[in-house]
Image (spheres, helix red, strand yellow):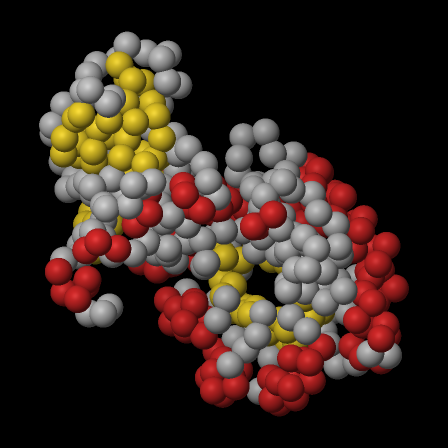
């Protein structure tokens, strides 16, 4: 993408997250098509993108939200008000009284959690499910692999059999699995086959099957026809309602993080920005990965190469090395792409770093400031 396609670039404050509404709508239209053509329910995974000012827009396309605990569940209930699902590896007893009044589906991670809280949830009219672990790894990132050896996520078939098999699931309405991370329909196909092999005899007694998240549905090249075939196969074979819980697919490539160059160390080829990997895009360090920068190239591909770094005290707070057609200077703007997902929900104020402002940009170039942050936001967290 060329910088010229961002007419708002020089107008927005830095650092700031800017959400591209046109791209967001494009993603949502793809997901809505899946709902309309298969009957599956698509839910926003709030752990990835919780910009609730856009929930009315998202809710016009999707069936609802899914949460990882009480606060996300409250947010989905208050701001979207549609289907509201929740899963946690372990629920807090003090949260249950409120959770069962604001959620439609509650997924338990273990049979012990189901035995402890299931009756309370069912008495409130909540549909209950169990997260299963199909023990089928399809990815290379162990930190994001729920099927890795020793994983705490999901119940294995051996545990169900040890507890009495089908009888141990009496009263449950559905099963849930989440094993993917930024993957295609081919990985889902492999996983579904593993689910059918290990848990297929349990599915006819279920009302629904939740395929979790990690589906890169809106990424160019994703095999949507294959996804639809998988959904229909499960519906036809087991007579279940199918749920999908994408997070990244909702806001993929729909956001930018705009930063300003504060200093350039020519002798080191380093440009220090007013943003931070550790504070504003933690997955850069956690995963790790190198985020795309608008108008840049690989190191050495263009005339001027710089390592982009943060003003924090963390020596490793660098974002990546990029090349540019023109030299960077104090005041130059740098635009990181694909910054809507896992950024606002994970950022922090380490070193007293200011949180980026949040804006939206429409197709005509107009911007709207959704939220700004200041010293009190830093202080109030401590």
Of residue 125 and residue 137, the one placed in the foreground of this image is: 137
Residue 380 visible, this angle: yes
Of residue 224 and residue 142, the one placed in the foreground of this image is: 142
287 with respect to 359 (left or right): right
Q: Quadrant of residue 197?
A: bottom right
Please report the residue visible at 64 percent of the width from the left and 64 percent of the height from the top.
152
Eyeballing the image, is 260 above or below 84?
above
Eyeballing the image, is 12 above or below 107?
above
Quarter holding the C terminus is bottom left
Please report the residue visible at 30 percent of the width from the left and 27 percent of the height from the top.
307
Q: Quadrant of residue 170?
A: bottom right
Eyeballing the image, is 369 above or below 7?
below
Quarter holding the N terminus is top left
Please report the residue visible at 51 percent of the width from the left and 81 percent of the height from the top.
92
Q: Position of residue 70 (x, y in %)?
A: 45, 74
9 with respect to 53 (left or right): left
Please report the residue visible at 46 percent of the width from the left and 58 percent of the height from the top.
47
Eyeballing the image, is 193 above or below 320?
below
Q: Position of residue 150 (x, y in %)?
A: 68, 60
Residue 16 visible, this angle: no
Q: Quadrant of residue 330?
A: top left
Q: Position of residue 294 (x, y in %)?
A: 32, 26
């Amino acid at each position: 993408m060329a910088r010229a396609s961002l007419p708002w670039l020089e107008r927005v404050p830095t650092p700031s997250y800017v959400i591209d509404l046109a791209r967001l709508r494009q993603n949502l239209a793809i997901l809505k098509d899946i709902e309309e053509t298969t009957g599956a329910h698509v839910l926003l995974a709030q752990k990835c993108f919780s910009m609730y000012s856009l929930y009315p827009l998202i809710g016009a396309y999707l069936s609802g939200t899914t949460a990882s605990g009480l606060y996300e569940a409250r947010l989905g209930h208050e701001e979207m008000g549609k289907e509201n699902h929740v899963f946690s590896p372990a629920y807090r007893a003090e949260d249950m009284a409120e959770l069962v009044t604001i959620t439609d589906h509650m997924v338990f991670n273990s049979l012990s959690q189901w035995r402890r809280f299931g009756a309370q949830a069912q008495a409130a009219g909540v549909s209950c499910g169990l997260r299963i672990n199909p023990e089928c790894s399809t990815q290379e990132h162990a930190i994001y692999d729920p099927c890795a050896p020793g994983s705490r996520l999901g119940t294995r078939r051996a545990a169900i059999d040890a507890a009495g098999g089908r009888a141990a699931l009496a009263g449950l309405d559905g099963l849930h699995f989440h094993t993917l991370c930024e993957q295609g329909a081919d990985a889902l196909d492999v996983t579904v086959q593993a689910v059918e092999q290990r848990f297929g005899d349990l599915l006819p007694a279920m009302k629904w099957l939740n395929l979790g998240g990690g589906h890169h549905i809106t990424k160019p090249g994703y095999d949507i026809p294959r996804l639809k075939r998988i959904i229909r196969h499960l519906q036809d074979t087991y007579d279940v309602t199918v749920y999908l819980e994408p997070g990244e697919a909702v806001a993929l490539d729909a956001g930018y993080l705009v930063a300003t160059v504060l200093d350039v160390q020519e002798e080191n080829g380093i440009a220090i920005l007013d943003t931070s990997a550790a504070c504003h895009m933690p997955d850069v360090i956690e995963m790790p990965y190198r985020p795309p920068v608008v108008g840049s190239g690989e190191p050495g591909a263009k005339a001027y190469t710089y390592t982009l770094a943060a003003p924090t005290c963390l020596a490793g707070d660098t974002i990546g090395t990029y090349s540019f057609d023109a030299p960077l200077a104090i005041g130059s703007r740098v635009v990181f792409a694909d910054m809507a997902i896992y950024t606002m929900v994970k950022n922090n104020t380490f070193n007293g770093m200011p949180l980026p402002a949040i804006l939206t940009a429409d197709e005509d170039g107009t911007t709207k400031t959704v939220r700004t942050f200041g010293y009190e936001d830093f202080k109030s967290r401590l």
